[in-house]
Image (cartoon, rainbow, N blue to C red):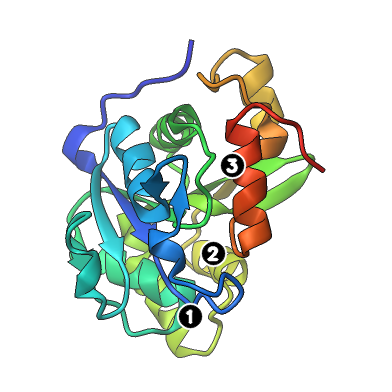
Amino acid sequence: MPENPSLGPSAAGFVLVGGRSSRMGTDKAVAQLGGGALVDRALAILRSAGLSTAVIAGARQDLAEFGPVIEDPGSGPLGGICAGLESTEAAYALFLPVDMPLLPPELLTALLGRMERTGAGITLASLGGFAQTFPVVIEQSLALGLRAELRSGNDGCFSAFRSATARARRSLEIVSVENLVQSGLVEDPRGLPPAFWFTNVNTPNDLAKAEAILAGHHVS
């Protein structure tokens, strides 16, 4: 059975909405997939994992119909992460990009549960031996270190995660999705294999592929 830690108010969820959607040709956040906007799907994933939710989207109050909007300085995903951490008193913050609509909520609860048990500073997932930058769970105490990395010009998320945890003498844990699935700790209720979970939707073709996956078609 999937892990279902009762973290309650100790964990908060954030959807990162950034960029100019130039490859999509239209506003990616409100692009429709399976009858709903990508931003709404991302928020639903977080809520299904038992998290409070907010959207981090620059000065875009037009997304307020979907949920609370937190402004960020427009300095890329790391800037959004820093803004999210600074907006909450929760012990843990989980960040999910708006363009990863196929992640099962059970994976998020598994990452949060692992974080709580191990005391890691940052927890990520890996697929096929490759670490995935998102979704990411970050412990509140790393907020200042990540902000320092951003100010120093180290705005690459994964690089900043490594540097901030090393300076704080905290661990950066990378959890194998395959191991979680084989152990029965994570299941996808739609029956999608892990290879589809981290699908990025950045272009109209990506959107069509995601629609095909949801419809039960295997696509290349």
Residue depicted at 36% across the width and 56% down the height = 15
Foreground residue among 187 and 203: 203
What kind of residue is marked 1? Answer: Arg
Residues at marks 2 and 1 touching, judged by CB atoms closer than 8 Å: no
Which quarter of the rendering shows the C terminus? top right
Q: Is residue 116 above or below residue 165?
A: above
Secondary element at image label 1: loop
Mark 2 or mark 1: name the one nearer the start of the chain: 1
Callout 1 environment at 10 Å: few (<14), some (14 to 19), or many (20+)?
Answer: few
Residue 194 left/right relative to 164: right
Picture quadrant of residue 54: bottom left
Callout 2 environment at 10 Å: few (<14), some (14 to 19), or many (20+)?
Answer: many
Residue sticking out furthest to the right: 220
Foreground residue among 130 and 168: 130
Residue depicted at 33% across the width and 24% down the height = 5
- Residue 141 tag number: none
Callout 3 environment at 10 Å: few (<14), some (14 to 19), or many (20+)?
Answer: some
Instruction: Name the residue beneath numbered marker 2.
Output: 161
Residue 194 left/right relative to 79: right
Instruction: Name the residue beneath numbered marker 1.
Output: 20
Secondary element at image label 2: helix
What kind of residue is marked 3? Answer: Glu
Foreground residue among 176 and 30: 30
What kind of residue is marked 2? Answer: Phe
The x, y position of residue 23, in whole percent, is 61, 74
Distance from disc 1 to disc 3, alpha carbons, whole Å, reads 22 Å
Mark 1 or mark 3: name the one nearer the start of the chain: 1
- Residue 211 tag number: 3
Q: Nearer the viewer, mark 3 or mark 2?
A: 3
